Each structure stands twice: as C-alpha cells, then as structure tokens.
Amino acid sequence: MRPKSNGMPVIRSFLSHEWRTYKNLRLRALADSPDAFGSTLVQEKDRPDTEWSARLASGVASHQDLPLVAEVGTESIGLAWGRIESSNPDVANLYQMWVAPNYRGLSAGQMLLESVIAWASAANMCYLVLNVTCGDSPALRLYVRAGFQAVGEPEPLRPGSELLAQPMRLALRMGV
C-alpha cells in the first residue's frame, strides 16, 4: 500500500550531510532488488559510517558525479547516481537506480532517469551508459522507452554470478 501523499516525486541532488539517508536508501535498494546491482547487501551493509559519509561527500563535491534522491513530501523514496569516468570523458554512467516498491508507478524512476540524462547532456557527453539485469523488467522497459539500446553481449552481473546484465547506451549527441 502506498502511503498517502499530496505531491508528485521531486528529484534533487543529495547534500553531503545526508549520508544517512543515502546509506538507508542504498541498503534498502540492495535488500529489495538483490539481482539488480553489481554490489550486494552483504558487501555494503557493514561499511563504516565514515565510508558512507565520505562516499557521498566526495560525490556531492565532484563535478563528475551526480548523486540524486527522489522524494515525496518528506519521504526519501529512491536514488540514482550519475558518474563521468575520468578514463572515458565522453561517457557518463548511470548507477544505483532504484525506487521503493510502494512508490513505483509515480514516475519517480522516469524523473530520476531524465535528471541524469539532462545532466550528462549538459556536460556534453556522447553517451549515457548503464547495465540492466537481463529479462523482461520494468527497469529494462524504462530504459528502452528512453531510447537506450543494447550494446555488446550480456555479461555476468557480478563476478561469479549466473545472472547476466545487458550493457545499454543512449546517444546524447546527434551523429554519434
């Protein structure tokens, strides 16, 4: 059951002091959707608070990162993280995309995705890339609707995993 809300989701950048909110959302995402991420709850849950704080503070301070939170009212309901890797400065990546189950269907995922696309476009990236677990899923359908196309062959979701993830990319500039 979805909690009552008078508003639509709002997407904004995390603030560096909100690391507890980031940590909570990330751990909820890994618990709720263990087959959707390269990392696992076991790998992340015992990280010290100083690491969570440093991770978010570094992302907030960087011009190469975009840590986003989705909110409805005062409730944090989702997250996404955009990153431009210094090793490939024409490509932005989308990581950690997740919306809480009882808030799905409010377009929060679409809004998070559009925010990362707008950020990557404004940074003049050629492509936005991501990996999505293979199978018919709402996440895959969202990415396809946004114009992402499969590139290359599926690869293991994480080392030793039987699950496969499909690399996808969205061209952000004409002619690429």
Image (cartoon, rainbow, N blue to C red):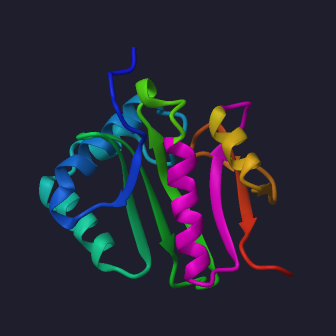
**Is residue 124 shown in magenta?**
yes
Q: Residue at x 80, y 56 (%)?
A: 149
Which residue is outermost to the top? Answer: 1
Q: Which residues are magenta?
A: 108-137
Closer to the camera in the image, 70 or 34: 70
Farthest right residue in view: 175
Could you tell me which quadrant the N terminus lies in? top left
Residue drawn at 40 percent across, 37 percent down: 30
Inspect this view and state whether residue 159 appears.
no
- Asked whether, in this view, residue 153 is left or right of residue 95, the answer is right
Residue 118 visible somewhere in the drawing = yes
Spot the residue most to the front.
6
Nearest the eye: 118 or 6: 6
Quarter of the view holding residue 92 = bottom right
Above or below residue 128? Residue 30 is above
Across and down, in percent, residue 121 comes to 61, 76
- Quick one: 45 or 142, which is closer to the camera? 142
Query: In percent of the image, x 75 and y 79: which residue is there?
Result: 173
Drawn side of residue 174 relative to residue 33, left or right:
right
Q: Give x and y (percent) for residue 37.
A: 51, 44
Query: Residue at image x 33%, y 21%?
Result: 3
Q: Position of residue 89 (x, y in %)?
A: 58, 85
- Residue 129 placement (x, y as % from top left): 65, 64
Quadrant of the drawing holding the C terminus: bottom right
Depicted 64 relative to depicted 102: above or below? below
Q: Decide whether residue 110 is among the magenta residues.
A: yes
